[in-house]
Amino acid sequence: MNQPLAERMRPQSLDDYAGQKHLVGKNSVLRKMIDSGHVPSFILWGPPGVGKTTLAKIISKQLDIPFFTLSAVNSGVKDVREIFDKVKSNNFFNQRRPILFIDEIHRFSKSQQDSLLAAVENGTITLIGATTENPSFEVIRPLLSRCQVYVLKSLDENDLLALIDKALSEDPELKKKKIKIQETSALLRFAGGDARKLLNILELVIEAEEGEEIVITDEKVIDRLQENPVAYDKDGEMHYDIISAFIKSIRGSDPNGAIYWLARMVAGGEDPKFIARRLVISAAEDIGLANPNALLLANACFDALTKIGWPEGRIILAETTVYLATSPKSNSTYMAIENALAEVNQSGNLPIPLHLRNAPTRLMKNLNYGKDYKYAHNYEGNYVEQDYLPEEIKDKQFWFPQNNAQEAKIQEHIRKLKGKL
């Protein structure tokens, strides 16, 4: 039985590799490393069907490096350790360290990702991870700090058209047929920048045709796929664009835009829990202290979805979406944690003031841990003036209230406590 067209057309060298010229084109950063023979651990981030797995295999083949592969969907720590044991027992003398390719690495839990750290750091393997999700959020920081991140882009129209021509002229099976591509709009539209999807669609349409000459038109493509040409693809790039439009509409206080993009996701079969998670994030990031109830409602939305299920769950999502879109907005707490993290990164681990330290033992008390700490509840208004930051930054401010009714009340309360009125 023949392999699928997408597999038969999988590039075997960088010269045959479609797109991603910014990474593997002449004089590009990754191409230079490959040509030098020294490839560090890295993560490939991009939508499906843009060549992440293919690129990893080409690197292994070109550099003649042993290649191990795992899918995070069905692999765990045990599988990772078995590969490490195999690498150590085989003792790849006079060879570069083996490549471990992990597809969908974002699906690995924290403990699973932790299991990779030592092997990456001591050079047991070169890790190449592939992900469709933002590594900043899905890959643990210690592992991310040990890996470069390279972003792959959806293939453009020229890349896809070249791939069609290449398949028709070089694939042994297609060369047996007389195929004419009369129209390409539907092929390109359905592919959505995904090379694998393009070749799968092409093969599906060709196999459905009979006769000596096969003519491919937009009508035939749409008929064979039996889809709406503007259908939402929850696994493709549109997945990210629509959720982006959804969140930006909420942030921009446009309930009509927000509910429309919600409808696009619901109609397209998006995972309701994915939408609910993004609503929880939006409530904290974009609404924040301007309306603290927004986070409570978003969290209740997530819980209710698990109890109610589908399709009624769409009503709960709609209610929460409109509520968040029409709420006053503030990102003061988001900015506060970013400001504080910037200070921590700049100043490092500053000493904790003695009066704030815990003193569970006699030794610690003798060292003045906790000495002179003022218990706020012992003072009028449950407040007393004292320093809560390290001496070096004791006057720093990280949270800045924004111009909304709720934060104005908070600011007024703090001013009264500090006796500044």
Image (cartoon, rainbow, N blue to C red):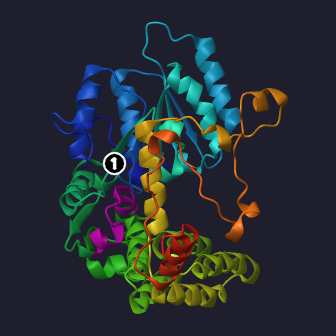
- Towards the viewer: 137 or 108: 137
Q: Badge 1, how many Cα within 10 Å: few under 14, some, many 20+?
A: some
- Towards the viewer: 112 or 143: 143
Query: Can you identify the residue that label 1 sits on?
Result: 151
Please state the horizontal and vertical placement of residue 218, each as a whole percent of the image: 27, 78
Please state the horizontal and vertical placement of residue 163, each as a whole percent of the image: 25, 54
**Residue 75 visible in image:** no
- Residue 209 lies, with reference to residue 153, above or below; the image says below
Task: Judge whether residue 67 is colored magenta.
Answer: no
- Residue 107 lies, with reference to residue 278, above or below; the image says above
Amino acid type shown at disc 1: Val
Mark 1: which secondary structure? strand
- Towards the viewer: 361 or 221: 361
- Image side of residue 303 versus residue 62, left or right: right
**Residue 347 visible in image:** yes
From which residue to which does the magenta span run?
Answer: 186-200
Q: Residue at x 23, y 60 (%)?
A: 156
- Residue 286 lies, with reference to residue 194, above or below; the image says below
Q: How many marks?
A: 1
Task: Judge whether residue 196 is colored magenta.
Answer: yes
Please state the horizontal and vertical placement of residue 312, each as a whole percent of the image: 67, 89
- Residue 119 lies, with reference to residue 340, above or below; the image says above
Q: Quadrant of residue 276?
A: bottom right
- Towards the viewer: 350 or 72: 350
Q: Residue at x 32, y 41 (%)?
A: 11
Q: Quadrant of residue 110?
A: top right
Task: Considering the whole magenta stretch, tell me its main secondary structure.
Answer: helix
